[in-house]
Amino acid sequence: MSLHDAYARLTPFELAFPDFDAVDQLIADITEEASGRGSDPANPSVFITMGSVGQFIARLQEPDAPPESIHQYGALVYHAAFFRDEGCPVYVLDAATARYLVEGSPSGEATPPTSSGYLQLPQHLFWVAGGPEEAPESIDGFFWTASRSGTLYVLAATGVMPGRPGFGTIPVPEAPIAEAGAWLNADARGEGTDFSSALPGADIDGLYAVEAAGEVLKLLARFFAYLDSAPGAAVPGEGPAQDGQDPPPSVLPFSRVVLDG
């Protein structure tokens, strides 16, 4: 299976919110509303109740969308707003570095490099199992947002494929950043080896699976720690030399995360 890590692929943020100005206006509306209410929009429970957020989500939803879909849309809009407000930090993890992080824990502090960002994984390297009658999905990456209160919120994006409409999202339970050091060497699955995959051909292609929320936190914590221990590992990225490349490139600036030395 062909992996891709040469440049930033079109991100879920760009796919879901092609009108960046609309997100910028949402951020301004949230700031004004939160100031008036004296509330903290970085708390997702507060964020989803804000009038400006509800109106924004209503414009995204299909007319016949079930009421509970507001929570699925809300998680994506939450991360999109803070990702955009932070300046859209995109980190592209190359395959060699991803394998290094799976195999062991770096020595640095597991502190997020930015309060919000998107870690794009090598295409088709990490997979999540589908339902009983659903095919496995490739994990494109993880959005993270760290609140001022010290809580980390994470959303995984799956099934981002050229020519395929939409993508999947998997929210990860919130976790205190103060405990991130414990995630580095945690036994996330409890049974079986973390990141091991039973997918056909996984051994041949060296593919990984994510079966537990703890594996997401473990990989993110190792990414955070790696950047802390090797700041030179994040280098300015360059897009493809020609237009019309496959997979479609992102228009956002990005950093490539490579093995340092």
Image (cartoon, grey):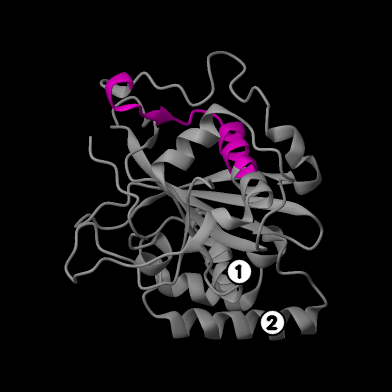
Q: CA distance from mark 1 to mark 2?
A: 11 Å
Q: Secondary structure at mark 1?
A: helix
Q: Secondary structure at mark 2?
A: helix
Considering depth in this image, is 251 or 51 the residue closer to the camera?
A: 251
Where is residue 201 drawn, in percent x and y? 26, 21
Which residue is drawn at the image coordinates 34% and 40% (left, top)?
138
Q: Is residue 55 above or below residue 28?
A: above
Mark 1 — residue? 82
Q: Is residue 24 above or below residue 66?
A: below
- Near mark 2 (Cα within 10 A), the count class, few <14, some 14-19 or many ≥20, is some
Task: Kindly identify the amino acid type of the residue bearing the numbered disc 1.
Answer: Phe
Which residue is drawn at the image coordinates 42% and 65% (left, top)?
237
Q: Is residue 187 above or below residue 230?
A: above
Where is residue 13 drawn, in percent x and y? 43, 65
Residue 84 shown in magenta? no
Q: Is residue 172 left or right of residue 10?
A: right
Considering depth in this image, is 68 or 156 the residue closer to the camera?
A: 156
Whether residue 125 appears in this view of the structure is yes
Where is residue 121 drawn, in percent x and y? 43, 47
Q: Residue furthest top?
A: 191
Task: Kindly identify the amino acid type of the residue bearing the numbered disc 2.
Answer: Thr
Q: Is residue 149 above or below residue 221?
A: below
Which residue is drawn at the image coordinates 57% and 38% (left, top)?
219
Mark 2 — residue? 31
Region of the chain picked out in magenta, as a range: 203-222
Decide whether the magenta segment is chiefly helix, strand or loop: helix
Q: How many marks?
A: 2
Label annotation for residue 108: none
Q: Earlier in the sequence, mark 1 or mark 2?
A: 2
Considering depth in this image, is 109 or 210 the residue closer to the camera?
A: 109
